[in-house]
Amino acid sequence: MALLELENVHVYYGNIHALKGISIQVEEGEVVAMLGANGAGKTTTLRTISGLLRPREGRVHLRGESIDTMPPHVIVHKGVGHAPEGRRIFARLTVEENLMMGAYARADPHGIKEDLDRVFALFPRLKERISQVAGTLSGGEQQMLAIGRALMARPRILLLDEPSMGLAPVLVEQIFETLKTINTQGTTILLVEQNAYMALTIAARGYVLQTGEIALSGKAAELQANEEVRRAYLGG
Amino acid sequence: MRSDRGSWGRVISGGLIFGAAAVFVSLVGMVEALGVRVIVIGVIDFGRLLLLLIGLGAGYQAARRGGGGVVIALLRGLLAGAATGAGLAALLVLGSEVNLRGMFINASPALFEIISFGRGAAGVPLVVAAGAVVGVLGAAATLLPGTVRGPLGAGVTATIVIGLFQELLQIILQGEEGVRAAIRQLIFVPEGLPPRGALEVFVVVLVASALWRSRRPVVRGWISKRPPRTQRLLRLLGLLLAVAVVLVLPAAGGLFVSQVLVLVGLYTLMGLGLNLEVGFAGLLDLGFVAFFAIGAYTVGLLTSTGQYGVAHWSFWAAVPVALVVSLIAGFLFGLPILRIRGDYLAIATLGFGEIIRLLALSDALRPWFGGSQGILAVPKPNIGGFEFSGPMQIFYITLVSSAFIAFVAARLRDSRLGRAWMAMREDEDVAEAMGINLINVKLLAYGIGGAFAGMGGAIFAALLGSIFPHSFNLLISINVLALIIVGGMGSLPGVVVGSLFLVGLPELLREFSDFRFLVYGAALIIMMQVKPAGLWPAAAVRRELLKEEPVGAVTEGPVAERAEA
Ligand SMILES: Nc1ncnc2c1ncn2[C@@H]1O[C@H](COP(=O)(O)OP(=O)(O)OP(=O)(O)O)[C@@H](O)[C@H]1O
Ligand SMILES: [Mg+2]
């Protein structure tokens, strides 16, 4: 049974048909990439999985259990962590307070402490800035914080919405290294990216979204080799 | 040189803005009305003080901007002050040429008498010169080192405060002999504060403040070297002393002061509630008075011995019910507006406040709520024969409930629920993605905030002994919002400070009452400029506003957005 499965999901914003029957599967332990141009519906897909949007049609299953009617806070409890688009950190709170907010849904102080150490091990820069106000972090640090905060919920599956956005290439590489580590430590990742090249280096499989529909899917290597993908997303 | 000229132009235009402010407060009648209150006999009254402060402000402002040495700064102050004076002088000239009274009823001969130092149009040069002198003084204040400015400021402030409240203080210090009388006779004459008393107060406070400044590190050092137990004991002692002072306030201050204090207490209760909604949870609410009304009507209906009383309960039995009813009202109030955000929330909540008032006022519900005639014969609370018959006694109920509710609010703030509110305040969407149940958390904010205000309403009913719908108008909601902004959004001590400043002070200075909302508006604008975080900011806000701009750090994203918002 797949860890996460979307089955023919349709999502509307009023009259706008944003997702037109999307089916996606993510297996336990995988990194799956979701590629697509601006406005293709990537963010919409992640928000639907988190319960922030409701599909009008279709199902979302987590380990076989249907979660598409559950409110967001219950879905978080079930193990879905979401680092939203655009590094939405709590700008006026400190780094530590942001991370603790990520653990809001949990009630095991011991485990929370463990995960805090784990996040600091993954992102040593955050530890140095533990009591700095998050709004004053650099863009890269804010992205680290957003990922770290999502990890604090100890999710089974981590939904990442464009973690490379607006970052220098070196930093992007560093972040993707860390994502790989997070994955090998046992967290499944569904990764939305515009940076198809980087995404496909760490993902095992990928989906290409086009105006609300899955245009292509397959192994990372296949996608990398695909002419259309190369032309549209890999610049060649 | 060119840029220099530009900056002198700015100094003058800045001074003219202060001059416009001086003209404005004169023409709306503030100077004359406040002039009734003499601060130092034969020297200055409140109206003149206001003009003086505007001149000082002009000089202070001008000197603080831009570099330059001492002389340049003083010159800036002189120029700005003269420009301020010129504004008033222009009014003087205009007033002597044209009859302004047709348009400005406050442009009376008495006003021109005040402005012109009794010389009419001939006083023009004097007014400008006086402005210049005052401007230099204001500029000088920026140049003084803190060790001098602090004590000096304390001395002046103390003298002004004692002069302003001389009547009240004399009542407090009444009696024929003893310490009180001795102090009174030392400072005051029966008519007020004479120059000699003013000087005494000034010197004593100046010296005391300077001494305290120089001794403070020593005292602090001494305390920090004591064993922890002694330190705790000292802190406890300080607390007990403060409590003791507060406890004797009604007895010392008399009926009028007690009345004001109870009012401050009621606004503190409401402020604590609204602070929880707006400051903690970020939910704007302009209909907050609804909960105050619901608390009052619940107690009124349950305890009244009059026509509309339904149960003839005691106050103490009715209060818990009032709390529960306003809590439930908060939930119900929250339900329809769960999905509304931002500006729309302001409008929607505004409507709610009015709905409750109109329901209470309506003829259809008159058989139950008494309509515009209200509910009469609400009995006073009593415990075992002791009746809380008036403000001097009800003060203690207000005090205890404010303290208790502030304690509850502090505990809530530091709880899990408080963290959820904080996350919601910062970013509702992300809070939801963090696993926070927005519906519960919002409803709890409205409910608990409402209950706090309901407590205030309950006391209000007992205080007045009658309840009328017109007591619960929009202005109360606005007052409460203004006081938590002035005190500091999200800060608990800020609520008390805010209600002392915006409710207590205007109440004590009755001459103010006509200009209350003018003063509110000015206070809010000045606050936003000078102390945007409020008089007693909450920790998170303080951090944000006082942080140093880190060199090269990215400040885009949420911070920038918030700054614009
Ligand atoms: N709140 C909304 N109301 C109306 N339309 C929306 C809303 N949010 C998104 N859309 C529309 O839905 C479509 C998909 O948007 P979505 O944000 O999912 O795109 P995306 O793939 O994440 O794009 P990007 O890479 O630019 O982030 C777009 O056409 C967008 O305009
Ligand atoms: Mg997107």
Image (cartoon, rainbow, N blue to C red):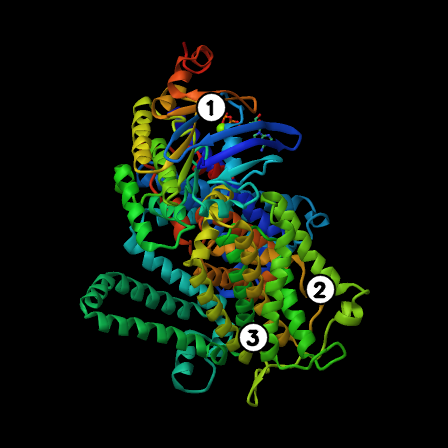
Which numbered disc, 2 or 3, marks the residue closer to the eye?
Answer: 2
- Using the numbered discs, state the Cα–Cα distance from disc 2 to disc 1 in whole angstroms: 64 Å
The location of residue B420, given as percent across then percent down, is 46, 52
**Chain ID for label 1?**
A
Does residue B483 show up?
Answer: no
Quadrant in which residue B444 is drawn: bottom right
Image mark for residue B470: 2
User: Who is closer to the viewer here, A187 or B459?
Assistant: A187
What element does badge 2 sit on? helix
The location of residue A46, given as percent across then percent down, is 49, 34
- Using the numbered discs, state the Cα–Cα distance from disc 2 to disc 3 in whole angstroms: 23 Å
Answer left or right for B210 relative to A72: left
Image mark for residue B256: 3
What amino acid does circle 1 point to?
Tyr
**Chain ID for label 3?**
B
What amino acid does circle 2 point to?
His
Q: Residue furthest bottom?
A: B385
Tell if the residue under mark 2 belongs to the same chain as the one under mark 3: yes
Is residue A39 placed above or below A60 in the rendered structure?
above
Q: Considering only order in the chain, which callout, 3 or 2, is on the residue closer to the N terminus?
A: 3
How many circles with numbers are drawn on the protein? 3
Tell whether circle 1 marks a residue whose Cβ is less than 8 angstroms from ligand 1.
no
The location of residue B138, given as percent across then percent down, is 40, 48
Tell me what residue is drawn at x 65 percent, y 47 percent.
Answer: B347
Tell if the residue under mark 3 belongs to the same chain as the one under mark 1: no
- Using the numbered discs, state the Cα–Cα distance from disc 3 to disc 1 in whole angstroms: 75 Å
What amino acid does circle 3 point to?
Phe
Quadrant in which residue B462 is drawn: bottom right
Tell whether circle 2 marks a residue whose Cβ is less than 8 angstroms from ligand 1.
no
